[in-house]
Image: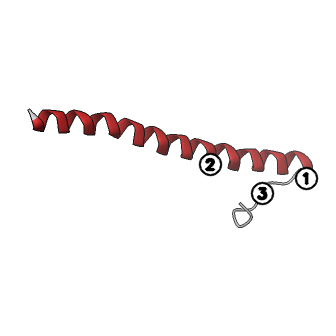
Amino acid sequence: MLYLVTTNSNKIREPTLLQGLRYKLMIEYKDTVGRTRRYYIVTGQYLNEEVI
């Protein structure tokens, strides 16, 4: 019984960890894309990888 409880609790924690990681990646992606778009709109030039 203890083994089943431990397995179930690990299964519950795992999706929340993945959701947190997915959320962080989504925020970072939106930030990077947003900066690139704003820079292009203002300057008319694409942003270098060094600047990003």
Front position in the image: 16 or 40? 16
Q: Earlier in the sequence, mark 2 or mark 1?
A: 2
**Foreground tag (2 vs 1):** 2
Q: Amino acid at mark 1?
A: Thr
Between 3 and 33, the residue placed more toward the observer is 3
Q: Residue 8 placed where, x, y %?
A: 22, 33
For the residues marked 2 and 1, what is the alpha-carbon distance in whole angstroms? 22 Å
Cα–Cα span, label 3 and label 1: 9 Å
Q: Which residue is mark 2?
A: 28
The 10 Å Cα crowd at callout 3, few under 14, some 14 to 19, many 20 or more, is some
Type of residue at label 3?
Leu
- Circle 1 sits on which residue? 43
Q: Which mark is on residue 9?
A: none
Closer to viewer: mark 3 or mark 2: 2
Q: Who's the residue at 11% across and 38% down the image?
A: 3
Residue plotted at (26% across, 39% down):
10
Q: Residues within 10 Å of mark 2 (few under 14, many from 20)?
A: few
Mark 3 lies on a secondary structure that is loop
Quarter of the rendering occupied by the N terminus: top left
Quarter holding the C terminus is bottom right
Instruction: Point out residue 12 in the picture as x, y percentages from the top left corner.
Output: 31, 33
Q: Give the quadrant of residue 5.
A: top left
Q: Secondary structure at mark 1?
A: helix
Question: In this rendering, is residue 6 above or below 28?
Answer: above
**Disc 3/disc 2 C-alpha distance (Å):** 16 Å
| Callouts 3 and 2 close, C-beta under 8 Å | no
Q: Is residue 41 left or right of residue 37?
A: right
Q: Amino acid at mark 2?
A: Glu
Instruction: Report x, y in % for residue 7.
Output: 19, 37
Q: Where is residue 25 drawn, in percent x and y?
A: 55, 46
Name which residue lies at 41% across and 37% down: 16
> Mark 3 sits on what residue?
47
